[in-house]
């Protein structure tokens, strides 16, 4: 670590941001899993459920979740968005530009 303006500089790998976002989403009780819904082969072809983009000093996160049956999808998405942004900012010290939550399935 190096010092910059009295604060330590930290380089964080993309996989650390992905895992932080995934774990933050899973802390929301209405989230069954962070994954794509539907058949397994679709998930393999479509790519990872968590995508991270870095633009300048800002991080954007896009994640797909499968919600528990009976969950309020609008409220669940909002809670996931808030939890992911807070975790990335607080734990990693990165500025979050936006968090996009796609509900890709319910149950299963």
Image (cartoon, grey):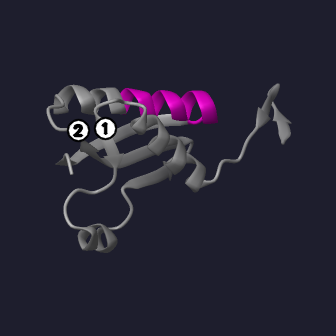
Residue furthest front in the image: 108
Residue 85 in the image: above or below residue 44: above
> Residue drawn at (66%, 48%), measured in percent from left and top?
12
Query: Residue at position x 29%, y 42% from top?
Result: 101
* Residue 55 seen in render: no
Q: Is residue 82 above or below residue 68?
A: above
What crowding class fits label 2: few (fewer than 14 Cα within 10 Å), some (14-19), or many (20 or more)?
A: some
User: Image point 25% across, 30% down: which residue?
Assistant: 76
Give whichever of 12, 20 is nearer the camera: 20
Determine which residue is flagged by label 2: 68
Give the SS element for disc 2. Answer: loop
Q: Are marks 1 and 2 in contact (CB under 8 Å)?
A: yes
Residue 9 horizontal side relative to residue 16, left or right:
right
Disc marking residue 73: none
User: Magenta stretch mostly in which secondary structure?
Assistant: helix
Q: Quadrant of residue 72?
A: top left
Magenta segment: 81-94
Q: Please give the residue where the numbered disc 1 appears in the rendered image.
A: 31
Residue 67 lies, in percent from the top left, at 24, 40
Query: Is residue 99 in sight in this rendering?
Result: yes
Q: Is residue 103 above or below residue 71?
A: below
Q: Is residue 41 above or below residue 82?
A: below
In x, y percent, where is residue 78?
Answer: 28, 28
| 86 part of magenta stretch | yes
Q: Which residue corresponds to the image point at 52% horizontal and 31% vertical from the top-left?
A: 87
Kindly report the distance in space between the C-alpha atoms of the residues bearing marks 1 and 2. Answer: 6 Å
User: For residue 15, what is the image quadrant?
Assistant: bottom right
């Amino acid at each position: 670590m190096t010092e910059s303006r009295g604060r330590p500089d930290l380089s964080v790998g993309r996989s650390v941001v992905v895992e932080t976002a995934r774990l933050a989403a899973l802390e929301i009780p209405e989230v069954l899993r962070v994954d794509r819904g539907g058949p397994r082969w679709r998930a393999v072809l479509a790519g990872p459920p968590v995508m991270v983009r870095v633009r300048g000093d800002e991080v954007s996160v896009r994640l797909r979740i499968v919600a528990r049956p009976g969950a309020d999808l609008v409220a669940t998405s909002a809670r996931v968005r808030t939890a992911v942004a807070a975790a990335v900012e607080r734990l990693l010290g990165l500025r979050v530009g936006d968090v996009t939550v796609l509900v890709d399935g319910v149950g299963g």
